Amino acid sequence: MQNYVLSCCSTADLSHEHFASRDIQYICFHYTMDGVERLDDLGQSLSFEKFYAAMQAGADTKTSQVSAGEYIAHFEKFLSQGKDVLHVTLSSGLSGTHMSARAAAQMLAEKYPERKIRIVDSLGASSGFGLIMETLADLRDGGMEMDALADWIEENKLRMHHWFFSSDLTFFVKGGRVSKTAGAIGGMLGICPLLNMDFEGHLIPREKIRPKKKVINRIVEMMKEHAENGTDYSGKCFICHSACFEDARAVADLVEANFPKLNGKVVINNIGTTIGSHTGPGTVALFFWGDKRID
Protein backbone atom coordinates (compact mmCIF):
# COMPACT_ATOMS: atom_id res chain seq x y z
CA MET A 1 0.00 0.00 0.00
CA GLN A 2 1.32 3.43 -0.95
CA ASN A 3 2.31 5.74 1.92
CA TYR A 4 0.62 8.82 0.50
CA VAL A 5 -2.85 10.28 0.36
CA LEU A 6 -4.66 11.14 -2.86
CA SER A 7 -6.81 14.22 -2.25
CA CYS A 8 -9.02 16.70 -4.10
CA CYS A 9 -11.94 19.04 -3.45
CA SER A 10 -15.66 18.42 -3.64
CA THR A 11 -15.92 20.14 -7.03
CA ALA A 12 -14.70 16.88 -8.62
CA ASP A 13 -18.42 15.99 -8.42
CA LEU A 14 -18.28 12.30 -7.62
CA SER A 15 -20.45 10.81 -4.90
CA HIS A 16 -19.26 10.41 -1.32
CA GLU A 17 -19.53 6.64 -1.80
CA HIS A 18 -17.43 6.78 -4.98
CA PHE A 19 -14.65 8.73 -3.27
CA ALA A 20 -14.69 6.32 -0.32
CA SER A 21 -14.58 3.24 -2.56
CA ARG A 22 -11.46 4.58 -4.33
CA ASP A 23 -9.78 5.83 -1.13
CA ILE A 24 -9.74 9.45 -2.35
CA GLN A 25 -9.91 12.13 0.34
CA TYR A 26 -11.73 15.39 -0.36
CA ILE A 27 -12.32 18.81 1.19
CA CYS A 28 -15.57 20.72 0.73
CA PHE A 29 -16.17 24.07 -0.95
CA HIS A 30 -18.88 26.31 0.55
CA TYR A 31 -21.99 27.98 -0.80
CA THR A 32 -24.77 30.12 0.58
CA MET A 33 -28.42 29.77 -0.33
CA ASP A 34 -30.59 32.75 0.57
CA GLY A 35 -27.93 33.85 3.05
CA VAL A 36 -27.54 30.47 4.79
CA GLU A 37 -24.01 29.05 4.54
CA ARG A 38 -23.72 25.38 3.60
CA LEU A 39 -21.05 22.86 2.68
CA ASP A 40 -20.78 21.54 -0.85
CA ASP A 41 -20.82 18.04 0.65
CA LEU A 42 -21.91 16.03 -2.40
CA GLY A 43 -25.61 16.24 -1.66
CA GLN A 44 -25.39 14.74 1.82
CA SER A 45 -26.89 17.62 3.82
CA LEU A 46 -29.18 18.91 1.06
CA SER A 47 -30.21 16.65 -1.80
CA PHE A 48 -29.47 17.75 -5.35
CA GLU A 49 -33.18 17.57 -6.13
CA LYS A 50 -33.98 20.08 -3.37
CA PHE A 51 -31.01 22.28 -4.30
CA TYR A 52 -32.00 22.65 -7.95
CA ALA A 53 -35.69 22.97 -7.12
CA ALA A 54 -34.79 25.89 -4.82
CA MET A 55 -32.77 27.52 -7.61
CA GLN A 56 -35.67 27.16 -10.02
CA ALA A 57 -37.93 28.75 -7.40
CA GLY A 58 -35.64 31.79 -7.25
CA ALA A 59 -33.25 31.04 -4.39
CA ASP A 60 -30.07 33.13 -4.43
CA THR A 61 -26.84 31.10 -4.35
CA LYS A 62 -23.24 32.22 -3.97
CA THR A 63 -20.08 30.13 -3.67
CA SER A 64 -16.79 30.44 -1.80
CA GLN A 65 -13.59 28.50 -2.19
CA VAL A 66 -11.61 26.56 0.40
CA SER A 67 -9.39 28.86 2.48
CA ALA A 68 -5.68 28.32 3.17
CA GLY A 69 -6.54 27.66 6.82
CA GLU A 70 -8.97 24.91 5.88
CA TYR A 71 -6.36 23.35 3.61
CA ILE A 72 -3.83 23.42 6.45
CA ALA A 73 -6.22 21.49 8.72
CA HIS A 74 -7.04 19.05 5.90
CA PHE A 75 -3.42 18.33 4.97
CA GLU A 76 -2.20 18.16 8.56
CA LYS A 77 -4.55 15.25 9.31
CA PHE A 78 -2.40 13.13 7.00
CA LEU A 79 1.02 14.68 7.54
CA SER A 80 0.72 14.07 11.29
CA GLN A 81 0.17 10.38 10.50
CA GLY A 82 3.46 10.25 8.59
CA LYS A 83 1.86 10.33 5.14
CA ASP A 84 2.67 12.47 2.11
CA VAL A 85 -0.14 14.21 0.19
CA LEU A 86 -0.91 14.62 -3.50
CA HIS A 87 -3.73 17.16 -3.76
CA VAL A 88 -5.40 18.12 -7.03
CA THR A 89 -7.41 21.35 -7.22
CA LEU A 90 -10.28 22.73 -9.24
CA SER A 91 -9.07 24.60 -12.34
CA SER A 92 -7.24 27.84 -11.61
CA GLY A 93 -9.17 29.22 -14.57
CA LEU A 94 -12.36 29.03 -12.49
CA SER A 95 -11.23 29.55 -8.90
CA GLY A 96 -8.40 30.81 -6.72
CA THR A 97 -8.44 27.64 -4.63
CA HIS A 98 -5.22 26.40 -6.26
CA MET A 99 -3.29 29.32 -4.77
CA SER A 100 -4.86 28.72 -1.34
CA ALA A 101 -3.74 25.08 -1.46
CA ARG A 102 -0.23 26.07 -2.49
CA ALA A 103 -0.03 28.64 0.32
CA ALA A 104 -1.10 26.00 2.85
CA ALA A 105 1.49 23.54 1.54
CA GLN A 106 4.25 26.13 1.84
CA MET A 107 3.30 26.93 5.44
CA LEU A 108 3.22 23.26 6.41
CA ALA A 109 6.58 22.53 4.78
CA GLU A 110 8.33 24.24 7.70
CA LYS A 111 6.44 22.19 10.30
CA TYR A 112 6.81 18.87 8.46
CA PRO A 113 10.14 19.12 6.57
CA GLU A 114 10.33 15.33 6.25
CA ARG A 115 6.97 15.11 4.44
CA LYS A 116 5.95 16.00 0.89
CA ILE A 117 2.86 17.85 -0.35
CA ARG A 118 2.39 18.05 -4.12
CA ILE A 119 -0.28 20.46 -5.38
CA VAL A 120 -1.54 20.01 -8.95
CA ASP A 121 -3.89 22.31 -10.86
CA SER A 122 -6.34 19.99 -12.65
CA LEU A 123 -7.29 22.63 -15.25
CA GLY A 124 -10.58 20.78 -15.03
CA ALA A 125 -13.90 20.84 -13.24
CA SER A 126 -16.87 18.74 -12.16
CA SER A 127 -16.77 15.06 -13.12
CA GLY A 128 -13.96 15.72 -15.63
CA PHE A 129 -11.89 16.60 -12.57
CA GLY A 130 -13.49 13.49 -11.05
CA LEU A 131 -12.36 11.30 -13.95
CA ILE A 132 -8.83 12.64 -13.45
CA MET A 133 -9.03 11.53 -9.80
CA GLU A 134 -10.44 8.14 -10.82
CA THR A 135 -7.51 7.61 -13.20
CA LEU A 136 -4.99 8.69 -10.57
CA ALA A 137 -6.51 6.16 -8.16
CA ASP A 138 -6.11 3.45 -10.81
CA LEU A 139 -2.43 4.35 -11.29
CA ARG A 140 -1.82 4.56 -7.53
CA ASP A 141 -3.40 1.16 -7.02
CA GLY A 142 -1.16 -0.15 -9.78
CA GLY A 143 1.87 0.82 -7.68
CA MET A 144 2.86 4.26 -8.97
CA GLU A 145 4.75 6.39 -6.45
CA MET A 146 3.48 9.87 -5.58
CA ASP A 147 6.07 11.96 -7.42
CA ALA A 148 5.69 9.88 -10.57
CA LEU A 149 1.91 10.19 -10.30
CA ALA A 150 2.08 13.97 -9.86
CA ASP A 151 4.41 14.23 -12.85
CA TRP A 152 2.11 12.00 -14.92
CA ILE A 153 -0.98 14.14 -14.36
CA GLU A 154 0.94 17.36 -15.01
CA GLU A 155 1.92 15.88 -18.35
CA ASN A 156 -1.50 14.45 -19.23
CA LYS A 157 -4.19 16.67 -17.65
CA LEU A 158 -4.89 18.57 -20.88
CA ARG A 159 -5.98 15.29 -22.46
CA MET A 160 -9.09 15.32 -20.25
CA HIS A 161 -11.93 16.67 -22.39
CA HIS A 162 -14.87 18.59 -20.91
CA TRP A 163 -17.87 19.23 -23.17
CA PHE A 164 -21.04 20.90 -21.81
CA PHE A 165 -24.41 21.99 -23.07
CA SER A 166 -27.28 23.75 -21.35
CA SER A 167 -30.97 23.84 -22.20
CA ASP A 168 -31.64 26.67 -19.71
CA LEU A 169 -29.67 29.92 -20.07
CA THR A 170 -31.22 31.63 -17.02
CA PHE A 171 -28.23 31.18 -14.73
CA PHE A 172 -25.66 31.79 -17.46
CA VAL A 173 -27.31 35.20 -17.88
CA LYS A 174 -27.40 35.75 -14.12
CA GLY A 175 -23.69 34.93 -13.84
CA GLY A 176 -22.77 37.23 -16.72
CA ARG A 177 -21.61 34.47 -19.07
CA VAL A 178 -24.45 35.23 -21.50
CA SER A 179 -25.96 38.68 -22.14
CA LYS A 180 -29.60 39.30 -21.27
CA THR A 181 -30.42 39.87 -24.94
CA ALA A 182 -28.69 36.68 -26.07
CA GLY A 183 -30.34 34.79 -23.23
CA ALA A 184 -33.80 36.01 -24.17
CA ILE A 185 -33.32 35.21 -27.85
CA GLY A 186 -31.75 31.85 -27.03
CA GLY A 187 -34.65 30.97 -24.75
CA MET A 188 -37.24 31.85 -27.40
CA LEU A 189 -35.46 29.89 -30.12
CA GLY A 190 -34.55 26.92 -27.93
CA ILE A 191 -30.81 27.41 -28.47
CA CYS A 192 -28.53 25.12 -26.43
CA PRO A 193 -24.96 26.47 -26.34
CA LEU A 194 -22.17 23.89 -26.57
CA LEU A 195 -19.11 24.76 -24.48
CA ASN A 196 -15.84 23.13 -23.56
CA MET A 197 -12.83 23.68 -21.30
CA ASP A 198 -9.86 25.34 -23.01
CA PHE A 199 -6.16 24.72 -22.33
CA GLU A 200 -6.13 27.34 -19.55
CA GLY A 201 -9.07 25.76 -17.73
CA HIS A 202 -11.73 28.30 -18.75
CA LEU A 203 -15.20 27.43 -20.03
CA ILE A 204 -15.51 28.63 -23.64
CA PRO A 205 -18.72 28.75 -25.76
CA ARG A 206 -18.09 26.92 -29.05
CA GLU A 207 -21.39 26.51 -30.91
CA LYS A 208 -25.04 27.59 -30.71
CA ILE A 209 -27.25 24.64 -31.54
CA ARG A 210 -30.99 24.01 -31.70
CA PRO A 211 -32.99 21.97 -30.89
CA LYS A 212 -31.84 19.99 -27.85
CA LYS A 213 -31.84 16.68 -29.74
CA LYS A 214 -29.27 18.10 -32.13
CA VAL A 215 -26.90 19.24 -29.37
CA ILE A 216 -27.16 15.79 -27.75
CA ASN A 217 -25.93 14.29 -31.03
CA ARG A 218 -23.31 17.00 -31.46
CA ILE A 219 -21.70 16.47 -28.06
CA VAL A 220 -21.19 12.79 -28.91
CA GLU A 221 -19.73 13.84 -32.28
CA MET A 222 -17.15 15.85 -30.31
CA MET A 223 -16.20 12.68 -28.47
CA LYS A 224 -15.81 10.82 -31.77
CA GLU A 225 -13.54 13.60 -33.01
CA HIS A 226 -11.37 14.01 -29.92
CA ALA A 227 -11.41 10.73 -27.93
CA GLU A 228 -8.24 8.68 -27.75
CA ASN A 229 -8.42 6.19 -30.66
CA GLY A 230 -11.73 7.63 -31.85
CA THR A 231 -14.64 5.19 -31.66
CA ASP A 232 -12.14 2.54 -30.47
CA TYR A 233 -11.80 4.54 -27.24
CA SER A 234 -11.26 2.04 -24.42
CA GLY A 235 -11.07 4.38 -21.45
CA LYS A 236 -13.70 5.39 -18.91
CA CYS A 237 -16.38 7.98 -19.62
CA PHE A 238 -18.18 10.14 -17.05
CA ILE A 239 -21.25 12.34 -17.52
CA CYS A 240 -22.81 14.75 -15.04
CA HIS A 241 -26.03 16.73 -15.05
CA SER A 242 -27.97 19.35 -13.12
CA ALA A 243 -31.54 18.14 -12.60
CA CYS A 244 -31.88 16.75 -16.15
CA PHE A 245 -31.15 13.05 -15.83
CA GLU A 246 -33.11 12.09 -18.96
CA ASP A 247 -30.85 14.30 -21.11
CA ALA A 248 -27.75 12.82 -19.46
CA ARG A 249 -29.09 9.31 -20.04
CA ALA A 250 -29.71 10.13 -23.72
CA VAL A 251 -26.06 11.19 -24.11
CA ALA A 252 -24.87 8.09 -22.23
CA ASP A 253 -26.94 5.79 -24.47
CA LEU A 254 -25.40 7.35 -27.58
CA VAL A 255 -21.88 7.05 -26.16
CA GLU A 256 -22.38 3.40 -25.27
CA ALA A 257 -23.82 2.69 -28.74
CA ASN A 258 -20.95 4.41 -30.58
CA PHE A 259 -17.99 3.34 -28.43
CA PRO A 260 -18.17 -0.48 -28.11
CA LYS A 261 -14.74 -0.79 -26.42
CA LEU A 262 -15.61 1.59 -23.58
CA ASN A 263 -14.21 0.59 -20.18
CA GLY A 264 -17.50 -0.27 -18.46
CA LYS A 265 -20.76 1.65 -18.66
CA VAL A 266 -20.88 5.44 -18.67
CA VAL A 267 -20.95 6.73 -15.09
CA ILE A 268 -23.59 9.43 -14.54
CA ASN A 269 -23.06 11.88 -11.66
CA ASN A 270 -24.78 15.00 -10.37
CA ILE A 271 -23.27 18.44 -10.92
CA GLY A 272 -22.54 19.56 -7.37
CA THR A 273 -23.71 22.66 -5.59
CA THR A 274 -20.58 24.75 -6.30
CA ILE A 275 -20.55 24.26 -10.07
CA GLY A 276 -24.35 24.04 -10.12
CA SER A 277 -24.69 27.44 -8.46
CA HIS A 278 -23.25 28.88 -11.68
CA THR A 279 -24.83 26.60 -14.30
CA GLY A 280 -28.24 26.20 -12.71
CA PRO A 281 -30.46 23.27 -13.77
CA GLY A 282 -30.49 21.97 -17.33
CA THR A 283 -26.76 21.38 -17.92
CA VAL A 284 -25.20 18.12 -19.16
CA ALA A 285 -21.44 17.54 -19.36
CA LEU A 286 -19.43 14.77 -21.02
CA PHE A 287 -15.86 13.79 -20.02
CA PHE A 288 -13.31 11.46 -21.62
CA TRP A 289 -9.57 11.11 -22.33
CA GLY A 290 -8.49 12.30 -25.77
CA ASP A 291 -6.14 14.49 -27.74
CA LYS A 292 -4.41 17.44 -26.06
CA ARG A 293 -6.49 20.60 -25.59
CA ILE A 294 -4.59 23.32 -27.47
CA ASP A 295 -7.04 26.25 -27.52
Image (tube, rainbow, N blue to C red):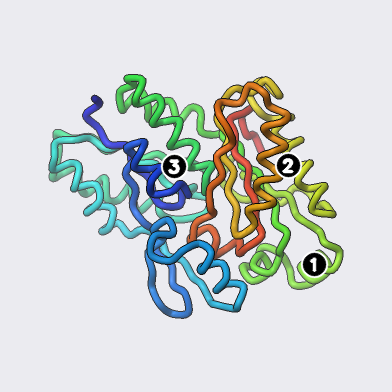
Q: Is residue 40 left or right of residue 265?
A: left
Of label 2 and label 1, which has the lower sequence position?
1
Q: How far apart in space, not on screen, are marks 2 and 1 (Cα)? A: 20 Å
In which quadrant is the C terminus drawn?
top right
Mark 2 secondary-structure assignment = helix
**Residue underneath mark 1:** 187
Q: Is residue 92 above or below residue 161?
A: below
Mark 1 secondary-structure assignment = helix
Q: Position of residue 61 (x, y in %)?
A: 51, 72
Q: How far apart in space, not on screen, are marks 2 and 3 (Cα)? A: 25 Å
Q: Mark 2 is on which residue type?
A: Ile
Q: Is residue 221 visible?
A: yes
Q: Position of residue 163 (x, y in %)?
A: 66, 44
**Residue underneath mark 2:** 219
Q: How far apart in space, not on screen, are marks 3 and 1 (Cα)? A: 35 Å
Q: Mark 1 is on which residue type?
A: Gly
The numbered dot on residue 121 is: 3
Q: Is residue 229 above or below residue 136?
A: above
